[in-house]
């Protein structure tokens, strides 16, 4: 079954705990948390303090997407705050391997993400050291952007690699995902759908998630 990870970037932050509880009631699989530093991306969102405060709102895994420069500096605080999966960008650190090892040494799942223009070969050397590959289908930084269909072949390339090598790596797509683009991404090999605006805007979240679960 396809996993659905609503991005709280599109939630009402004045009542974040309730918004996250709503995701659990609607049977989301993971809570996708977008962390931006104003350096790696031109926007600033939340940090470990906020994650720590909402940790008690749900038992769903926290899928924490670090869009920050030199993420190795912050792995520990994000793990301490309650992250279950910590994803870093391959473009954001000089030492990808050490960063992934640090995440795993703290007992958490490691994720690696790549921007739309970054080719799959940049992450290929690390595929044995990750649990999750996050393929960006927009330029990271803001919710509500349009899905970039030109990334579909890269999703397919990643999926082919995972199958050929028989490794246990989820492929998450992130950016501009809705019912239509989500189906396209799953068709190309995605196993996890992260989405902000489309899910937080829809009238019946539980029904929508149930529908997405069946894309596989
Ligand atoms: C983009 C973030 C995404 C984004 C998703 O920088 O990583 O997770 O918030 O939002 P939508 O689904 O609205 O594109
Ligand atoms: Zn994200």
Image: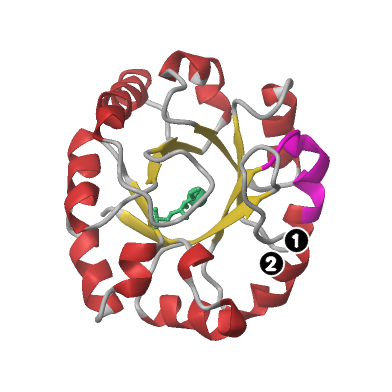
Residue under numbered circle 2:
51
Q: Residue at x 51, y 66 (%)?
A: 8
Image: magenta residue range: 68-77
Q: Quadrant of residue 186?
A: top left
Q: Is residue 77 above or below residue 22?
A: above
CA neighbours of label 1 inside 10 A, class few (<14), some (14 to 19), many (20+) = some
Q: CA distance from mark 1 to mark 2?
A: 5 Å
Residue under numbered circle 1:
48
Q: Residue at x 76, y 33 (%)?
A: 70
Quadrant (top left/top right/bottom left/bottom right) for the N terminus = bottom left
User: Foreground: 151 or 191?
Assistant: 151
Whether residue 112 is visible here, answered yes or no, is: yes
Dominant SS in magenta: helix
Helix, strand or loop under label 2 = helix
Q: Is residue 185 above or below residue 129?
A: below
Return the x and y of residue 179 as percentages of the image width and height: 20, 58
């Amino acid at each position: 079954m396809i996993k659905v990870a609503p991005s709280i970037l599109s939630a009402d932050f004045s009542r974040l705990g309730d918004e996250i509880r709503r995701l659990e009631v609607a049977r989301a699989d993971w809570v996708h948390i977008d962390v931006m530093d104003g350096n790696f991306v031109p926007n600033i969102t939340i940090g470990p303090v906020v994650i720590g405060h909402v940790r008690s709102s749900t038992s769903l895994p926290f899928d924490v997407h670090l869009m920050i420069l030199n993420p190795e500096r912050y792995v520990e605080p994000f793990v301490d705050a309650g992250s279950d999966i910590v994803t870093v960008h391959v473009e954001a650190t000089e030492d990808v391997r050490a960063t992934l090892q640090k995440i795993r040494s703290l007992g958490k799942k490691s994720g690696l993400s790549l921007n739309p223009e970054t080719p799959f070969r940049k992450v290929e050397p690390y595929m044995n050291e990750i649990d999750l590959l996050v393929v960006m289908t927009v330029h990271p930084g803001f919710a509500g952007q349009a899905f970039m269909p030109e990334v579909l072949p890269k999703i397919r390339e990643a999926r082919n690699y995972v199958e050929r090598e028989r490794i246990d790596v989820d492929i998450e797509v992130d950016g501009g995902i809705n019912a239509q683009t989500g189906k396209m991404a799953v068709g190309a090999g995605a196993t996890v759908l992260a989405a902000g605006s489309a899910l937080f805007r829809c009238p019946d979240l539980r029904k929508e998630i149930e529908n997405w679960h069946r894309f596989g």
